[in-house]
Image: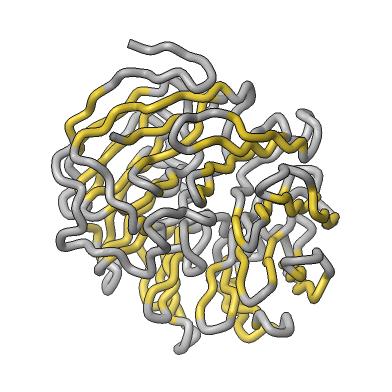
Amino acid sequence: MRQWGNGVVVLLVVALGAWSAGAFAPVAAAQTSSWSQFRNSPALTGIAASTLPATLRLQWTYEAGYAIESSAAVVNGVAYVGTSGGALLALDAATGKLKWSYEATSDDLGIGESSPAVANGLVYIGDLDGVFHAVDIVTGKARWTFKTGAEIKSSPVVVGGKVLIGSYDGHLYALDAATGTLLWKAATDNYVHSTPAIWNGVAYFGGCDEIFHGIRISDGTSVLALSTGAYTAASPAIVDGIAYYGTFANEVVAVDIAARKVKWRFLDPDRQFPFYSSSAVANGTMILGGRDKNIRALDMATGTQRWVFRTRARVESSPAIVGTRVIVGSSDGKLYVLDVASGEKLWEFDAAAPITASPAVAGGRVIIGDGDGRIYAFGS
């Protein structure tokens, strides 16, 4: 039974089996109470340290009124989500009650895929007007804003007193996280769509200029510019100095950062479609969605395909791994829970609207929005 409305509980009990850490323990996971940025960690691994109950129910649904492409950040019991109507929402994660709404931009431009990052009492997010916002988490008022030269779809990463953000003006920016002062900007030859992953003091990202970039965070100097021959929108996940991501050349690649070369490439021999989803990586397994409607798992050492799960539409949502389970949305309107080891479907929830945002897992619950403007929380 569904009852739509702000903070209205929808009764739905789902048996998921055990959600304990098991054989697929978290790699580079964040605190259990938080999912503080896109992919949850600066290395963008998509791993949740928070556990989930064996039995889930849909705790609440919030009607945002506009489509949700932005993925939630959840810190200290508050979920922050951007909407295509231009609002950054702060919701009580336990009840779905609105705490405040910050109007970043008009509904003509709105907030797209840029997902919030929370640090030091501020929540950061970019909008499709090219403005980057730092908003006070208590008051919901802007602390500062910074204008780039084009729309922002990249998500912010906060590291070492700096906040990094990519723009469609072709630059990666480093701003002072407290004041918004420009510290440096690094130019590329095309849009910067992806979110940079941080590894050993360097921000790494695949560009729409078909180059895999490494930019030193301290001063903005380029330390790596590796041609991969592929327009790239997905963000890399980095483990042990290897960056994993899909491309618009219909491939998944693993880049050995120290060796400055592609370690392996995966190309499906039968279904060749672009990869837009960013991957989740844990204990030798890489999982991502594809525009071929598939969710697939690859061996991180070799690129060999381990399993494929077929949905009914393209998968642009980026997966989250929670113990032995992986959670991911599809444009077929469903949120799926699969077994990490086998790809077996354990559960699905039908939102009846495309899900391109990615799940955030914190405080024992999953929070995600859909294309009809509903934000859902699943928990105990």
Q: Where is residue 118 in the image (x, y as percent from the top left)?
A: 60, 56
Residue drawn at x 52%, y 54% as measured from the top left: 38
Residue lying furthest front: 138
Q: Is residue 100 left or right of residue 42?
A: right
Callout count: 0
Residues 50 and 273: in front is: 50
* 357 relative to 21, above or below: above
* 214 relative to 360, above or below: below
Residue drawn at x 43%, y 59% as measured from the top left: 251
Q: Is residue 154 left or right of residue 376?
A: right
Quadrant holding the C terminus: top left
Q: Where is residue 343 in the image (x, y as percent from the top left)?
A: 20, 46
Residue drawn at x 44%, y 46% as measured from the top left: 360
Residue drawn at x 40%, y 71% as measured from the top left: 254
Residue lying furthest bottom: 259
Q: Describe the colour scheme in one phrase.
A: secondary structure
* 347 relative to 153, above or below: above
Q: Is residue 215 left or right of residue 374?
A: right
Q: Where is residue 80 in the image (x, y as percent from the top left)?
A: 58, 43
Q: Where is residue 241 in the image (x, y as percent from the top left)?
A: 42, 81
Please identify the quarter of the rendering in which residue 112 is found: top right
Quadrant holding the N terminus: top left
Asked if residue 20 shows in the view, the reply is yes
Q: Is residue 109 left or right of residue 211?
A: right
Please identify the quarter of the rendering in which residue 14 is found: top left
Please identify the quarter of the rendering in which residue 177 is found: bottom right
Asked if residue 372 shows in the view, the reply is no
